[in-house]
Each structure stands twice: as structure tokens, then as C-alpha cells.
Amino acid sequence: MIQCPQCDQLNEPFFKFCLMCGATLSGGAAVAQKPSRAESVRPRPEQPSKSEPAKKTEVAPVPAPVEPAPAPVAAAPEASPAPTPESSMELAAARTEPALLAVEPTPEPEPAREPEPVPEFTPEPAAEPTPESAAPEPASQPAADDTFAAPVEPSAVSSPDDDEELGEARGALADAPMETPAPAPAAVRAPEPAAVVAPVAAPAEPVRGGRRRTRFTLVVIRDDATDGERVALDEGIFTVGREGAQLEFADDVYMDPLHASLDVTDGSVTVVDQGSVNGVFVQIHTAVPLPSGGEVRVGQQLLRFEDIDAVRPLGVTADGSELLGAPVPSDTWGRLVEVVGPDFESAAFLLHKPSILIGREKGDITFPDDGYVSGRHARIFREGTRTLVEDLGSSNGTYLRAIGPTPIRAGAMLLLGQQLFRLDG
């Protein structure tokens, strides 16, 4: 290092002018030993040797300037890289700090404590000089340039407090433990799907002496075709009539006291006529067989079918006289009788065509005064030796009288007397 003869500032050996006052360094004194960075950059108040920054006891002036001898090529370490702008600013701050400290009041000495290490701000780490070293290894000298000769204004560089904070931050980062990445979670084997157990249906609620409630409901249809009373059906026999039945209609004179019964199980319902006068009628949706003597409700008309072979002939009187009547066509296969009361018949229609259409306005048999009969209501036709009846999409439906126990399904419509019912389930 070269000490300025004007201001005693220590300068690098290759500087031509003093970094502090700008004086020519040709007459300055060369210092044999380079002070440590901790002594040149930031004297700390707690160190006894640094408590008085104005005194410079570490270096002794040499009377004659001595040019530093170039380092041997063989012993020179790897050349340090050229100073960067950041390192230049830090070096400049180190050069200007003694002058700033000279004008500040001397701080009161604090109790002695362990000195904190000052981090080195060099591009590459280098070995710190020891007191026993005769002379530090000089760094490679960059080309002399007037840029380094000009003095640096203190306001253009960072303050000592900024350098100290920066050093503490870098020291904290260096001392901070490195985060160890968490190990990847081990693959978890998917559990085997549990066996699916079919749910067990809960038993129906027991009612009325231990009988179970079923899924079927009997719905009464009002005159305006809306749903009325709903009766849940229990397992067993359910009766309908004018009086003394489980479901009573006391005002319906066309219903017998015990008109019909429903044999109800959890999966089916069977309707049984109990010998009523007006019978039990079930609505049909497809062509069904029509036996001889079977009755059909079309609107308000009650029609009975008779096979021609079952019709009693008029016969001959005892004295051999024959009754005079209308001739019967040879292709006649049956007749349809209009019933207006018990044992009372109104009209009979001979059936000789393969298909007989029944309606209010169009057909082979018409009922123009019955508003419940559709224009094309139903048809009765012959198929081989069988006779069948079929509804043609009428508004009020076609009903066939049940003979004996008749199974019915959910959605079926029943006609008992003047009451209309629907079975839900």
C-alpha cells in the first residue's frame, strides 16, 4: 500500500493519485504490510485498538517511496478477476470511510465482547493474511486508468450502515440451514372394493291384526274425473259395497250391500264379483275374448253378446204351426242385445259381417243420444271361431264384465255400480 504524503490515506500500489485528496502519489511512502480489511473498512468501537480512529499506529511512514516489487510468476496464484462495479463501489466506500469517521464524534467505548466476523466482499474467496506473513500476495494489477484516479464523492456510494446490513444479511443466509426436500410420499395401494351387499327390503308396517300394508292403493274417481278418496290396501281381503263393507257407498242404489272383494297380496290384486246384480266391469285396452253371454259397457249402454248357436230357435207349435218371423241371413255368427233392465231386453242386432263397428255417429250399431259414446267407440269382430272386443281409443273407455276371479294390474280401472275406481301400485 502507498500512504498519501498529504492526507495519510492508504492507497493501492497501482494508484497514481490519492483516492481521498487527489494528490500525486509519487512522493508517498510505501507501507510494507497491508492492513486487514476489517481494520481499513470498519473500525469497531468495541475493539480497544480501534477506539480512536484518528490515530494510525498500525503503519509507520517510510521516508522514501518504494515501488512494490512484482510478484514472482511461479508463486503467483490464479489471477483475480477484474473488479466489478459492485466491488468498485464497496472499495470506494472503504476508501472514503476514514474521512467520514474523522469528523464524527468519538463514540463511548462499549464493554468488550467478541468481535463479529466481517464478511469479505471479493469475487472469489482468498486466504486472509496472518500476522506472521511478511507480505500479502498482491492481486494482479489491472491497467492503469484515470478512472481510478478521480476521487469518489461520499454521497455516490453506500453508507457503512448499508454495508453492515448487507453483510449481516449474507451471513444469515450462509448460516441458515438448507431445507431438505420432503421425501415423495410412498404410493398407497388402493383398497380393494368391498363386496356390495344388496339392501334388504324392510318389512311392510304391520296393521290391523298383524296384516302387512302393501304397495297398492284404491283411488275413487269423482264425477269430474279427478282423484277423490285414496284407500291403502292391506294384505288380505278388502270388500266394497253399499253397507257392511270396508269401503261403503250408501247412496249408490246400483251397488249391492256386498258388491265385490279384492284379494290383495304384496305382488298382485284379484277382483271377485260377489253375485251383484249389476256386476263388476274392468276397462280393456287391447282386443280381448268376448264369450257368449258376456256383457260390455259402452258409454251408458249395456250390451250382451250371444253366439248364434246358443240362440233358442222359435220352434214349432204343438199343432204343427210355425211362428212367422224375419228371415235370418245364412252368414250370421251372433247377435248383440241391448239390456235396459234385469230380464228386460230392448233391441237385438244380428252380427253377420266380419267386424262390427259401434259408435255414436258412425258404425254398424250407433247410439246418437248417448253423449258418453265416442264417434268411433269400439268394435266386435270374429277371428276364426272366437269373438273378440276392442276399444278404439274412446274418451270414456270400454268395460268388460268380470266373470269369476279376475287378476288386475296397477293402473286398471274398475266400474262397480255407478262408482269408478283406479288401482295404483
Image (tube, helix red, strand yellow):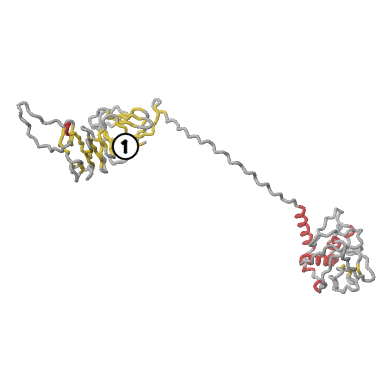
Q: Is 309 positioned to the left or the right of 54 in the image?
A: left
Placement of 362 over or under 235, stated as above or below? below
x and y percentages locating residue 393 in the rendered image = 27, 43
x, y percent for residue 206: 41, 28
Residue at 12% x, 37% y: name it: 328
Q: Is residue 248 left or right of residue 172?
A: left
Q: Nearer the viewer, residue 12 or 341?
A: 12
Which residue appears at 29% of the width and 41% of the height? 225
Relative to 361, residue 318 above or below:
above
Q: What residue is rendered at 31% in x and 32% in y? A: 407
Residue 216: which quarter of the image?
A: top left
Judge whether 92 appears above or below 338 on screen.
below
Residue occupied by mark 1: 412
Quick one: label 1, few (<14), some, or many (20+) residues within 10 Å?
Answer: some
Q: Position of residue 71 (x, y in %)?
A: 88, 66
In this rendered view, identify the residue nearer to me: 114 or 127. 127
185 vs 15, left or right, is: left
Q: Callout 1: helix, strand or loop?
A: loop
What residue do we see at 68% from left, 47% from top?
Answer: 182
Residue type, numbered disc 1? Ala
The N terminus - image quarter: bottom right
Q: Nearer the viewer, residue 324 or 118?
A: 324
Does the rendering let one see residue 193?
A: yes
Q: Is residue 253 visible?
A: no
Q: Quadrant of the C terminus?
A: top left
What is the residue that sits farthest to the right in this orientation?
A: 63
